[in-house]
Amino acid sequence: MKNKRGVEMTIGTMVIIVLVLLLLVIVTIGFSGGMGNFWKTIFGHQQEFNQDDINAKKVDCEARDVVSYCTQTVSIANQKTGNVTQAYCYANPINADLRYAENQSVWIAHGSAQSYCDSHYNTA
């Protein structure tokens, strides 16, 4: 047997095969469970805002009358940066529902609370 070129496999080839298999496993896990869930599982996840704070602000906003719902901002602290964000009740991350605001006499059939507030109270 003088020609043995096809019998040997180099270390470089084995490393490439292992890397390709690892990549295949990562892609399969990513597509089966979603890449967002996959990265959260690996690296963990810290929410930007505390959900209890958001819920408290949402209840506060929905207890207001329509004018203060549309015109006054609420403050919420960002857990990642520590910065305090000012947001209207209808904006992220609060997203309070205008239909529950006290003394509200409007029914938004089409559009959003933001478009209603912008057009009636000039909050834009």
Image: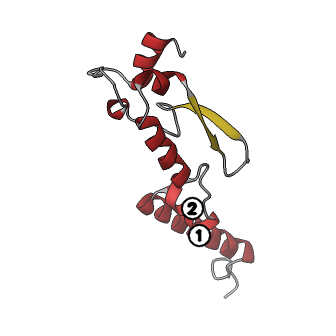
Residue 99 in the image, given as x and y percentages of width and height: 32, 31
Neighbour tally class for label 1: few under 14, some 14-19, many 20 plus, Cα within 10 Å: few
Q: How far apart are the alpha carbons under marks 1 and 2?
A: 19 Å
Left/right of residue 99 with respect to residue 75 in the rendered view: left
Residue at image mark 2: 40
Give 34 or 109, whichever is nearer the viewer.
109
Q: Residue at x 33, y 24 (%)?
A: 104
Residue 115 or residue 20, whichever sits in front = 115
Q: Which mark is residue 113?
A: none
Check whether the beta carbons of the residues at disc 1 and disc 2 lie within 8 A of each other. no
Q: Give the SS element for disc 1.
A: helix
Q: What is the secondary structure assignment of the residue under circle 2?
A: helix
> Residue 5's x, y, as percent?
68, 77
> x, y percentage for residue 91?
50, 31
Quadrant for residue 77, please give it.
top right
Q: Residue at x 33, y 34 (%)?
A: 100
Query: In this picture, is 119 found above or below 5?
Result: above
Q: Quadrant of residue 87?
A: top right
Q: What amino acid does circle 2 point to? A: Lys
Residue 60, position in %: x, y?
47, 40
Q: Which residue is mark 1?
A: 22
Residue lying at 44% horizontally and 11% vertically, measured from the top left = 119
In this rendering, the label closer to the viewer, 1 or 2: 2
Q: Farthest residue in the bottom direction?
A: 1
The structure residue drawn at horizontal position 70% and vertical position 85%, both measured from the top left corner, is 2
Quadrant location of the N terminus in the rendered image: bottom right
As rendered, which of 103 and 53 lies closer to the eye? 103
Mark 2 Cα shell of 10 Å, populated few (<14), some (14-19), many (≥20): few
Q: Quadrant of the C terminus?
A: top right
**Residue 118, relative to residue 81: is it above or below?**
above
Q: Amino acid at mark 1?
A: Leu
- Total marks shown come to 2
